[in-house]
């Protein structure tokens, strides 16, 4: 059915499927979680307005295109400062103050290093590492070739790999 | 672009030949790469509440008519309150329909809006739910309510709200239902409603209320507010069993209350956004004391 997305149930299913990855994608670009979540709402509002024209299969790339377009008219690029979770180690027995401090410093180092990557590489790298996406999927969402994704990924890995050395 | 340019990336995606892996492993970068990949596979972002985001999206839409989609009747939620000749009533009684899956449910601490196909709508207070027959809505507007809800009814055939303790037949356009335990409390803001319980029936008109406790109808009283108090962040009671008041408090704050002297009747209200204040609002006029434990999840009421 051409206008399936106009059905509230289907619209909701699309939201449940794609809203989080879209929000993450926007966060990798902006490092502003509140803004990213607002932009997700904007993108889905657009999808709703155009639900008669966008098929269920096309809705994902439509959403990414809309989200991407949000930035085309913006000139000011504030510094990206990404924050992550999930780096803490669960082994409570070895959490001496020194260890915790070390862990905190390492977390910060990773955050800084990833934040400092060029946007192209950063977005691709995090879509793979956090959202666990294959290159093919990222390529589809960004409208790029798999080769281009590999290239960005390779460069990101290359600049980040020395991160342990400094510890 | 030469193949070697994307070696690391292709390794991560499992695309390397055995030979390529061998040469990568022998290079000085191997240990670093492995460690980097391991560490970054643990990365995550702060949690994202999809359900809440979707709810917000839908309620924003309801408030903003320009993004409304003409094809979806059930999206418009909060724009109907001003309908002409509207009738609102507030009633209380607990429902039975345990075996049916509810069509709309408000979890504890939550207020949920739901719109029917004819643009009538219901706002469910927390812990409440409704069941109705969507397919026959055009011919029979019948809603079974568990808990408490505000109804806003569009003109049309009769609109009936069934509760365990009585049935409310709406003779106008908009109303609010509240229903717990053996109590049924109805407030009518505009228009007219008829309340039926235990073979008795009374009609309420503009700004009148009726309380039914254990099947016994009280007298019709007048009220001065034009909206149920809970929809503005308060719960209001008139001659209510104190135990029911504490039950409402438990639902609103998702806490446990250990009650004393529940046989008393309470008239008054409590706020929804400050537990301490709410406890004072209830206990002070009743001459009671209260204690909360550290995380405010348990409250003990004493004489």
Image (cartoon, coloured by chain):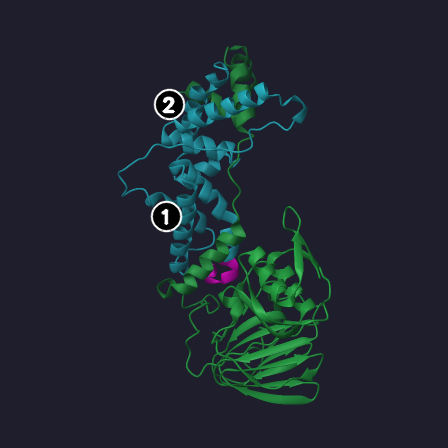
Q: Nearer the viewer, residue B164 or A75?
A: B164
Question: Where does label 2 land, which residue?
Answer: B1
Query: Could you say where residue B249 lies in the image, as x and y percent from the top left?
Result: 62, 62
- Point 42% across, 60% down: residue: B60
Is residue B41 toward the left or the right of residue A160 in the image?
A: right
- Point 37% across, 62% down: residue: B67
Question: Where does label 1 land, which residue?
Answer: A66
Q: Is residue B176 above or below residue B274?
A: below
Q: Colour of chain A?
A: cyan
Q: Are marks 1 and 2 in contact (CB under 8 Å)?
A: no
Q: How many callouts does the rendering have?
A: 2
Residue B56 showing in the rendered view = yes
Q: Secondary structure at mark 1?
A: helix
Chain letter for mark 1: A
Chain letter for mark 2: B
Q: Secondary structure at mark 2?
A: loop
């Amino acid at each position: 059915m051409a206008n399936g997305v106009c059905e509230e149930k289907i619209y909701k299913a699309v939201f449940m499927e794609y809203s989080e990855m879209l929000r993450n994608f926007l966060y990798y670009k902006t490092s502003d979680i509140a803004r990213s979540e607002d932009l997700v709402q904007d993108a889905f509002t657009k999808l709703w307005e155009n639900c008669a024209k966008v098929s269920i299969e096309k809705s994902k790339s439509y959403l990414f295109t809309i989200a991407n377009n949000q930035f085309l008219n913006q000139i000011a690029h504030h510094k990206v400062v990404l924050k992550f979770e999930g780096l803490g180690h669960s082994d409570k027995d070895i959490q001496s103050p020194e260890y915790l401090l070390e862990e905190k410093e390492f977390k910060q180092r990773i955050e800084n290093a990833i934040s400092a990557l060029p946007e192209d590489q950063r977005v691709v790298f995090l879509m793979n590492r956090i959202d666990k996406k294959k290159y093919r999927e990222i390529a589809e969402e960004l409208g790029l070739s798999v080769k281009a994704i590999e290239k960005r990924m390779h460069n990101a890995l290359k600049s980040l790999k020395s991160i342990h050395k400094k510890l | 672009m030469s193949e070697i340019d994307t070696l690391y990336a292709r390794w991560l995606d499992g695309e390397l030949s055995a030979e390529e892996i061998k040469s990568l492993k022998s290079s000085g970068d191997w240990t670093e790469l492995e460690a980097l990949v391991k560490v970054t596979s643990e990365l995550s972002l702060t949690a994202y509440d999809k359900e809440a985001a979707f709810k917000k999206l839908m309620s924003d839409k309801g408030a903003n008519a320009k993004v409304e989609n003409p094809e979806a009747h059930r999206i418009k939620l909060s724009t109907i309150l001003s309908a002409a000749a509207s009738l609102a009533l507030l009633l209380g009684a607990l429902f039975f329909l345990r075996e049916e899956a509810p069509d709309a449910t408000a979890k504890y601490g939550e207020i949920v809006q739901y719109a029917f196909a004819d643009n009538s709508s219901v706002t469910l207070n927390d812990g409440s739910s409704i069941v109705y027959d969507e397919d026959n809505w055009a011919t029979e507007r019948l809603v079974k309510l568990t808990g408490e809800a505000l109804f806003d009814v569009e003109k049309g055939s009769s609109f009936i709200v069934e509760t365990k303790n009585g049935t409310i037949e709406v003779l106008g356009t908009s109303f609010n239902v509240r229903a717990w335990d053996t109590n049924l409390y109805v407030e009518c803001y505009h228009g007219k409603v008829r309340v039926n319980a235990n073979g008795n029936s009374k009609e309420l008109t503009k700004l009148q209320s009726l309380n039914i406790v254990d099947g016994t109808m009280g007298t019709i009283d007048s009220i001065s507010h034009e909206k149920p108090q809970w929809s503005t962040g308060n719960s209001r009671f008139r001659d209510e069993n104190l135990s029911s008041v504490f039950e409402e408090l438990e639902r609103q704050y998702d806490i446990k209350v250990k009650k004393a002297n529940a046989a008393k009747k309470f008239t008054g209200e409590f706020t929804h956004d400050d537990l301490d204040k709410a406890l004072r609002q209830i206990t002070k006029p009743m001459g009671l004391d209260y204690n909360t434990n550290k995380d405010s999840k348990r409250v003990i009421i004493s004489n």
